Image (cartoon, grey):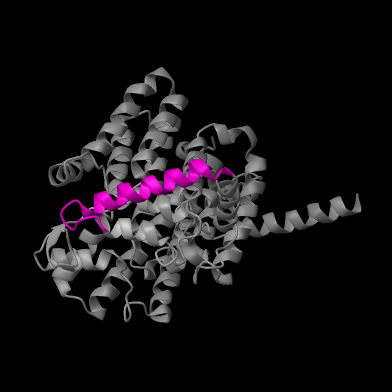
Amino acid sequence: MVQSARTNSLWSRITATFGHWPGIGTVLIAAALLRLASIPLVRSYLHPETWEFGPLARNLAQGFGYTDLLKDGSRVPSIFMPPAYSYFLAFFFWLGGERPATYLAIEVLQAAFGVLLVYVVYRLARLLIGERGAIAAACMTAIFPTQIYMCNEFHGISIYIVLETAAVFFLIRYLQISHAWGDVILAGLCMGVLLPFRGEAPALVLVYAAILALRGGRKAVVPAVAFALIAAACLAPWTIRNYREFGRVIPVCASGGYNLWVGNNENATGSQHYNYIGLMPAGEKAELGRIPLGRNTRVAQDDFLKRLAVDYIRTHPREEAVLALKKLFIFFVFDPSHEKGRNPAYWIPSLLLSLLAIWGAILRGKKLFGNDLFLVGSILLAVAVGMVVFVLPRYKIVIDPFLIIIAANVFAAKAPLNKLSSEAKPA
């Protein structure tokens, strides 16, 4: 009883503190200042790492189109990477050239997307858990280290994490409040813009459409189909381009076989960060090298690696079970082989968030299978992708907003801070 009294007293102090939390405007200002302050500290605009996106963006800006330069000097249409972020970079390269000022402008814009994410998380949390939980979720998103740092990475995650969270917001608002076609259309457009950023995103569209139909019943079947069709229509020009160039239906990119093989072979670690090419058996490497250079080189290589991965999965069930456990550990704890993933500034907050989300999920109970199902579906799909291929820190970062909202249930146990509007009534 003494321990219970102490716990209640501590909880009273915590909730009293939350009662004086700032409004959303103050949280957004703080989020902006933190993200802008990170830019001169990290200074990645002086030494930008653009990975595969930079060369593609450079080709676009120089008028060569979305192409790869092969070893023999020929140019062929590119198919390996999702295209959206390369086009995003290319616009800035075309506008200001490749120089620190250009990269600085990109980081400032990505910081603005980070602030927008805080606001979208707040609006989504208000729908699900009320004002108190929404302010808690906004504050957590504003100060979460990886969310602050993200604007310094030249990767599309700063953009598509906002689009995914916004799509979920519009779908839940449709089910819970508006029942208006406008929200279905906006959700479809968000997903349509998101699709060219992520190769696995078409699966996310199907997951959301299925949840919408399940939660809304028969009357939501047509909106669910419309949502999926709107998203698909946005991607259609790129898919048609791929069909014309490569003679097969490739919705976004052809890297699934490569990713599957990196995560499933005799040397796989569960991460992408190991010398997988160097450790590849000589016979397989020689066979890969015999694939002729040309327009379909990437597609043929991807098909070859996919066959290797499927054969390994089929013939090594015990090793695959061990790999699955390693991938789960990397996803929810840390990746010892990843320079940023093993940094305590990343993995300690990430682990604490996961634990807090478990607590919040317990408090949420059966409501997780209500409108929260969109959040749960997003989380499960991200985990599934990691389990099938390999795990990178960004696979978890993209679902952090949903984990934060679930975790914020811990702080939403009491009455809301303010009288809720009709939009803010918890589900």
Q: Which residues are magenta?
A: 290-317
- Quadrant hosting residue 72: bottom left
In x, y percent, where is residue 344?
A: 59, 71
Q: Main secondary structure of the magenta part?
A: helix
Q: Is residue 279 above or below residue 12?
A: below
Residue occupying the far left of the picture: 63
Q: Is residue 20 above or below residue 226?
A: below
Residue occupying the far right of the picture: 1
In x, y percent, where is residue 362?
A: 67, 41
Report whether 29 appears left or right of 367.
Answer: left
In x, y percent, where is residue 113?
A: 35, 60
Instruction: Identify which residue, 262 or 346, lies in the foreground.
Output: 262
Q: Is residue 414 magenta?
A: no
Q: Is residue 311 magenta?
A: yes
Q: How many marks?
A: 0
In x, y percent, where is residue 169?
A: 41, 42
Which residue occupies 20% across, 56% down? 292
Q: Is residue 424 visible?
A: no
Q: Is residue 347 above or below residue 186?
A: below
- Quadrant hosting residue 190: top left
Which residue occupies 36% across, 51% down? 305
Which residue occupies 80% across, 54% down? 7
Report whether 240 appears left or right of 395.
Answer: left
Residue occupying the far front of the picture: 283
Q: Quadrant of the C terminus?
A: top right
Q: Is residue 311 visible?
A: yes
Instruction: Identify which residue, 211 or 391, lies in the foreground.
Output: 391
Report whether 129 appears left or right of 51.
Answer: right
